[in-house]
Image (cartoon, rainbow, N blue to C red):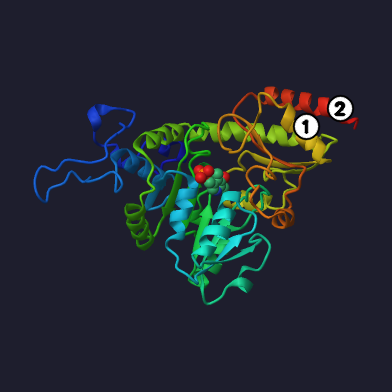
Amino acid sequence: MDRKIETKCLHLEEDEDCIKHYGAISYPIYQTATYAHSGVGKSTGYDYSRLQNPTKEHLEKVIASLENGISAFAFASGMSAISLLMEIFKPDDHIITDSDLYGGSIRLFRNVSAKNGIKISSIDCYKENIEDFITSDTKAIYIETPTNPMMNVTDIAVVSEIAKKYNLLLVVDNTFMSPYFQNPLDLGADIVVHSGTKYLGGHNDTLAGFLVTNRTDIAEKFAFLIKTTGAGLSPFDSWLILRGIKTLGIRMEKSQENAFKIAYWLKEQKAVTEVIYTGLPEHTGHEIMKKQARGFGAMITFKLESKAFALSILEKVRMIKFAESLGGVETLITYPTTQTHADIPPEIREKNGITESTLRLSVGIENAEDLIYELDKVFRETECELNV
Ligand SMILES: *Cc1c(COP(=O)(O)O)cnc(C)c1O
């Protein structure tokens, strides 16, 4: 019987028949830079930690197992993973990307990849005809689904058909869903990207990033590039992410349960003009989510009647933290305009629908009543102050 994902978060099937590391239940942290050899031409399998380290390797096997890939690679952050991914392309290669993406990815593509001669077309992959943008130089399609922060949902299987027809790589940033709710490789993607800083780590305490693939040729390219450029995750941070993953299942379930309650509460607020949560039946991507994912996650974007109202919420929250990032146990509220998407030119931000009254909530695992109590207090105080 195939193991379910909650179990895979705790047990690596290939390790189960043998007791290693004195039986330690928690995988040891191999805090070493280099490895001794017992003779010329002999090796323990490890030579130097830039190439590989047992703790990092164990984490990579766990991630590959969760995403049903053949290989996973752990990086010092999500952005270092995406930067390394871009090294497989060469000048004049053309990539089609979603126009609404994590701000750091847009900044990388527009400033660094462009400088290296890589041509980028940013389109709304969830609604535009991707085939219209494919040229003889096109090498890849890069999407997020749901996107950050507008929660646009793209049908991964449909895009994967297009990618296969034109021999393009399909890359999916799966950070928002985590492997617990969505597995893009199973739907035809070639490469999955994760910011491990978010749900995988889950505790707002460690940066990490991952690339996962089910193609040996791509895995070989990544292994060579990591050895050469050296952006691998440290042994201790690998251990922290391993520890986080153990509770991925219960964290995802609890945050999603809270997100539903908050989404419905937000919908009832006079000052809220729009609630964008893929779990709501009226969300345009809701049916696709039901088809390609096992849940809806815990990210909610919502718009207020005015910028003043949005700013007041950010000023007044106390238990809910006004902070960048997402996917941790603590609920965070973010202002995309000046935080995650500050470096995006205003005209692109506006085209994507990010207004100055747009806020993003990453719902954590607190008691939902406590979260709603705080939101209610903040909303009522703001109404009084602004006289609305
Ligand atoms: C945070 C994030 C990244 C970047 O990851 P870091 O770990 O912050 O470098 C990439 N993609 C998405 C969707 C993210 O939310």
- Please tell me whether residue 161 is drawn above or below residue 284 in the rendered image: below
Residue 293 seen in the current view = no
Secondary element under disc 2, as helix, strand or loop, is helix
Q: Are marks 2 and 1 in contact (CB under 8 Å)?
A: yes
Secondary element under disc 1, as helix, strand or loop, is helix
Residue furthest left in the image: 39
Q: Residue at x 51, y 42 (%)?
A: 180
Residue type highlighted by circle 2 = Glu
Disc on res. 241: none
> On the rendering, which quadrant does ligand 1 occupy?
top right
User: CB at mark 1 closer than 8 A to ligand 1?
Assistant: no
Picture quarter with the C terminus: top right
Disc on res. 312: 1
Label whose residue precedes the other's in the sequence (2 or 1)? 1
Q: Which residue is mark 2?
A: 385
Residue type highlighted by circle 1 = Ser
Q: Residue at x 61, y 25 (%)?
A: 366
Picture quarter with the N terminus: top left
Q: Is residue 30 left or right of residue 99?
A: left
Query: Could you give the CA–CA distance between mark 2 and mark 1, rounded to whole angstroms?
Result: 9 Å
Rendering coords of residue 188 (x, y %)? 49, 60
